[in-house]
Image (spheres, rainbow, N blue to C red):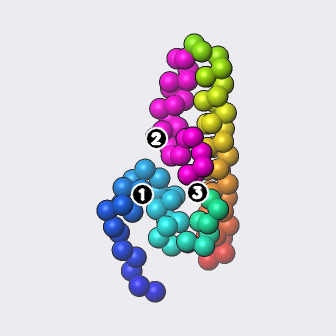
Amino acid sequence: MSEPSLSKSRFISGSQCHLKLWYDTYERDLASGVGYDDLEIAEGTMASVQYTLALANEDHEERERTFANLRAYCERDTYAMVRLREALGAI
């Protein structure tokens, strides 16, 4: 197996989500169907910022919408971690 290359875009993506970098580098097949592109909140830093903003938001509907988006992100992220654990367990 050859050493994986680390392009600028892969480096930036990996700095935002280490799990995505691992998937993109080592487990492309495992990563299929685990993307975040269809979510309003698509990475951890954004999730942290949105959570903090939602706590201070007095608009109940907007706050609930943000929390729903956070739940969707956390659900997907948990699913990705389970897939990663399964893959590592198979090694």
Q: Where is residue 26 in the image (x, y as percent from the top left)?
A: 51, 73
Measured along the vertical axis of the image, is residue 73 above or below residue 87? above
Residue at the left extreme, as displayed: 8
- Magenta range: 35-57
Q: How far, Cα to Cα, is label 3 from label 2? A: 16 Å
Which of disc 1 and disc 3 is earlier in sequence?
1
Residue 21 drawn in magenta: no
Q: Which of marks 3 and 2 is in front?
A: 3
Residue 35 bears which disc, if any? 3
Q: Where is residue 42 in the image (x, y as percent from the top left)?
A: 53, 46
User: Secondary structure beneath disc 3?
Assistant: loop
Measured along the vertical axis of the image, is residue 78 above or below residue 3? above
Tell me the amino acid under the disc marked 1: Gly
Tell me the amino acid under the disc marked 3: Gly
Query: Mark 2 and mark 3 in contact (Cβ < 8 Å)?
Result: no
User: Which residue is rendered at x = 33% and y = 67% of the image?
Assistant: 7
Measured along the vertical axis of the image, is residue 73 above or below residue 85? above
Which of disc 2 and disc 1 is earlier in sequence?
1
Tell me the amino acid under the disc marked 2: Thr
User: Which residue is rendered at x = 60% and y = 45% of the image?
Assistant: 39
Q: How far, Cα to Cα, is label 3 from label 1? A: 14 Å
Residue at the front extreme, as displayed: 38
Measured along the vertical axis of the image, is residue 69 above or below residue 32? above
